[in-house]
Image (cartoon, rainbow, N blue to C red):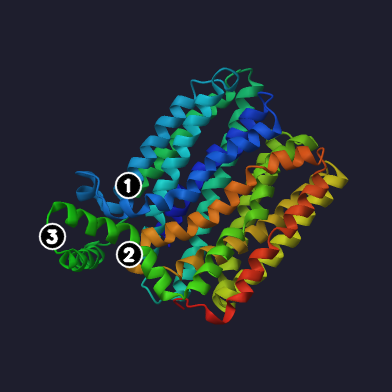
Amino acid sequence: MKRIFLFGFISGFPWVLIGSALSLWLKENDLSRSTIGWAGLIFGVYAINFLWAPLVDRLKIPYLSKVIGHRKSWIISMQTIILISLILWSTLSPNENLWLIILIGLGIAISSATQDITIDALRIEQINENESKTMAAGAAIQVVGWWTGYKIGGVISLMTAEYFQRLGFENYWQISFLILGLIVMISSVALFFVPEKSSYLRTSIQKEKDKKLFNKFKIKNQLTKSLAWLYGTVVNPLVSFFKKNSMGVAIGLLSFIFLFKIGEAFLGRMSIIFYKELGFSKTDIALYSKGIGWITTITFTLLGGLFAIRMGLFKAMLISGIIMALTNLMFSVLAWVGSSEILFAFTVLIDDLAAAFATVAFVAFISALVDRTYTATQFALLASIGTAGRTLFASSSGALVDWLNGDWGIFFIITAFMVVPSLLCLIAIKNKLKLNE
């Protein structure tokens, strides 16, 4: 569980870089809500990382994979790219280098999405296949780690930026990025001490399937051998998923995963802009949204994991979706009341409760769907589909607020109803689900 916590931290930390930090950096350089919203399209790479997940699952990084392990070698490599990106950000200004900054942000997103492929596989492989209760507990700890990386990163980035701004530094955000780079370095060093299970069994099964397919070819040469490898790498994980579930159930599952967190993503994409427009300072946002939010999220995540274990994954998904929709309405109340610190703290508290419960249930749910022969590829595919819904739709969140003439109350009501279609998909396939429970 300590290892899984570290995996979650490493996975969550980059989101604050291309989410809260980048959004507020652009906002404080007088860029519009729509521009900031569309800049969020860089999150789209999380929705398509399944395209290269098969390669990450099978290709080894020369020398590094042999020395520290296949999974860890990929994570360390991506962490290095993120560190270099932060150093580059520290030398740029949004008013002069907007597209370059977004391009570097895209590089961070690609690196983060790539390391997530191996982080999730490494997490799942720490737990035996049919230990469903341990899997739910592991999902809870993963989410605790993720939110810790996200929230602590948010506190550090916002408070250091405000601190250096008050000292009179014009490049206060750039200094903050260098400090965030130190956290990347520390987490990478910690990863070296995590043991990694042998990949011999998994690779043996994959090679055996490649060999069977290769033997079916009448002509046997390097080309047909490569085709067999490519088929085994890309197609077999998909075939395995659809074989385990019927076509109808598989489509229902994919639809549910795609739609489930769209409302939460709309809210999350614009929340920090909403707080700023209500008049809260960076310190207020860091304290209530990130600091207190981190503590409450950890608490509610662990409770959410317990509930998921007790009630089963289907009920956990259904109830968490309903709670998530209801809590979005609290933001409407905050929008109508105004900059009340007490209401702000309460709203963040309730939202963190819902988000923590929903995330734990969601991670445990899709973890229980994967075939261990194709752990990284199948989890990446399912997680990417969920991210696709959140990213592709939520990128228009700023445009929606502008279309509503800044009516935040109506905006949050709309986000509350966005979860309904996904829950209908889940109910439709209730009796045909095949989970590793």
Residue at point 76% right, 41% down?
401
Query: Amino acid type of disc 3?
Result: Ile
- Residue in the foreground of this view, choosing between 315 and 431: 431
In what element is the residue under mark 1?
Answer: helix
The answer for how far apart the CA atoms under marks 1 and 3 are is 35 Å
Sooner in the amino-acid sequence: mark 2 or mark 3: 3
| Residue that sits furthest to the bottom in the current view | 431
Q: Looking at the picture, does residue 101 appear above or below residue 380?
A: above
- Left or right, residue 433 beside residue 268: left
In what element is the residue under mark 2?
Answer: helix
The dot on residue 236 is: 2
Q: Which residue is mark 3?
A: 219
Residue 9: x and y in percent read: 47, 50
Q: Quadrant of residue 395?
A: top right
| Residue that sits furthest to the right in the current view | 337
The dot on residue 329 is: none
* Contact between labelled residues 3 and 1, with CB atoms less than 8 Å apart: no
- Residue in the foreground of this view, choosing between 386 and 122: 386
Query: Amino acid type of disc 1?
Result: Trp
In what element is the residue under mark 3?
Answer: loop
Tell me if residue 193 can be seen: no
The answer for how far apart the CA atoms under marks 2 and 3 are is 21 Å
Sooner in the amino-acid sequence: mark 1 or mark 3: 1
* Contact between labelled residues 3 and 2, with CB atoms less than 8 Å apart: no
Q: Which residue is mark 1?
A: 74
| Mark 2 vs mark 3: in front | 3
Residue 305: x and y in percent read: 55, 68
| Mark 1 vs mark 2: in front | 2
Residue 343: x and y in percent read: 81, 50
